[in-house]
Image (tube, rainbow, N blue to C red):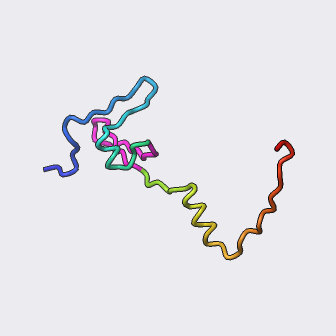
Amino acid sequence: MNHHRMKDFDTLTITEKGQAQFPASWRKQAGLMRGGPCDVRVMDDGRQSLLITPRPRKRRGALVLLAHLEDQAVAFPKVERHTMPFK
């Protein structure tokens, strides 16, 4: 019995341009509901099979920047406020 087999009726459609839409259940399980990078390997099984593995995402953005700034030993100098000439 093959424990790694996906559901029998999940399909993948590849467009003329080579774009694909993966099954929603797989994307949700892999954390790819908004898309993301995957590694694709060609299997030498005589049937042109592909092994598709989602890449782990390194989260970058505001939360990482905030954590970095909170870890700083020296505080930023206070910014002197001024009024804009058009106000």
The percent position of residue 16, horizontal first and vertical second, equals 43, 23
Give the camera-side residue of 51 and 62.
62
x, y percent for residue 3: 18, 52
**Foreground pick, 20 / 39:** 20
Q: Quadrant of residue 49?
A: top left
Residue occupying the far bottom of the picture: 73
Residue 53 position in % (x across, y down)? 37, 48
- Tell me if residue 83 comes above or below residue 42 in the rendering: below
Magenta residues span 35-54
Given the current orientation, which residue lies at the most extreme front position? 87
Name the residue: 84% across, 42% down.
86
Q: Is residue 36 above or below residue 76?
A: above
Quadrant, the C terminus:
top right
Q: Give the quadrant of residue 70.
A: bottom right
Relative to 80, 35 lies left or right: left
State whether residue 75 is above or below residue 60.
Answer: below
As drawn, 5 above or below 61: above
Q: Is residue 42 magenta?
A: yes
Q: Residue at x 40, y 45 (%)?
A: 32
Total labels drawn: 0
Front-lying residue, 19 or 78: 78
Q: Position of residue 37 (x, y in %)?
A: 46, 46
User: Residue visible at 31% across and 44% down?
Assistant: 26
- In this rendered view, identify the residue nearer to me: 36 or 6: 36
Please check the rendered image and state whether residue 77 is part of the magenta-colored stretch, yes or no: no
Q: Is residue 84 left or right of residue 47?
A: right
Which residue is at the far left?
1
Q: Residue extending furthest top?
A: 16
